[in-house]
Image: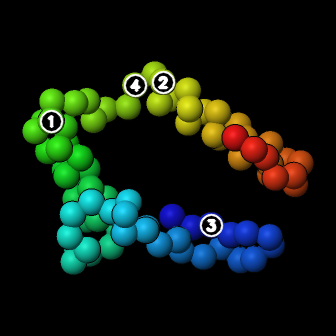
Amino acid sequence: MRGAQAGKPLADLSIPPELSLGSTRRPAGLPFNVAQLYMRMAEGIREGKSVSPDLDVAVKRHQLLDVIQKASDTGIRQIL
């Protein structure tokens, strides 16, 4: 993932350790993404909880995307 603030160039964003599942000793990119997915699926199976997004998650994502688009269109920081 890449991001920028206040006119600075796009740069790779690091994932904070508290948001990373499992070992930090793994390749970056697609292997990392697959490892995260498998760890979440295993957790869901062990704990008997859903790991698939539902309609509520979809609505929240669309609201977030709408706020990002509005900020981009207006140049004004938005509050979510």
Give the vertical position of 41 relative to 22 (above or below): above
Say which residue label 4 marks: 54
- Vertical position of residue 44 compared to residue 35: above or below: above
Distance from disc 1 to disc 2, alpha carbons, whole Å, reads 21 Å
Residue 5 place in picture, x, y as percent: 73, 69
| Residue located beneath label 2 in the image | 56
Q: Which mark is residue 47?
A: 1
Cα distance in 3D space between marks 2 and 4: 5 Å
Q: Earlier in the sequence, mark 1 or mark 3?
A: 3
Q: Residue 14: which numbered mark, if any?
A: none
How far apart marks 3 and 4 lie (CA) works out to: 27 Å
Residue 8 pos. (x, y %):
75, 77
Q: How would you rate the neighbour count of disc 4 (Cα within 10 Å): few for under 14, some for 14-19, many for 20 or more?
A: few
The mark nearer the N terminus, 1 or 2, is 1
The residues tagged by marks 1 and 3 sit, at their Cα atoms, a distance apart of 34 Å
Q: CA separation, marks 2 and 3?
A: 26 Å
> Which quadrant holds the C terminus?
top right
Residue furthest out toward the top: 55
Height in image: 21 above or below 69?
A: below
Residue at the image point whose x is 25% and y is 65% from the top:
31
Identity, as a three-letter code, of the amino acid under mark 3: Gly
- In this view of the protein, which residue sits in the foreground, 40 or 72? 40
Please give left or right for residue 1 compared with residue 69 in the image: left
* Secondary structure category for the residue under label 3: strand
Instruction: State which quadrant residue 49 falls in.
Output: top left
Label 4: state its secondary structure. Answer: loop
Left or right of residue 11, residue 74 in this image: right
Residue that carries the numbered disc 3 in the rendered image: 3
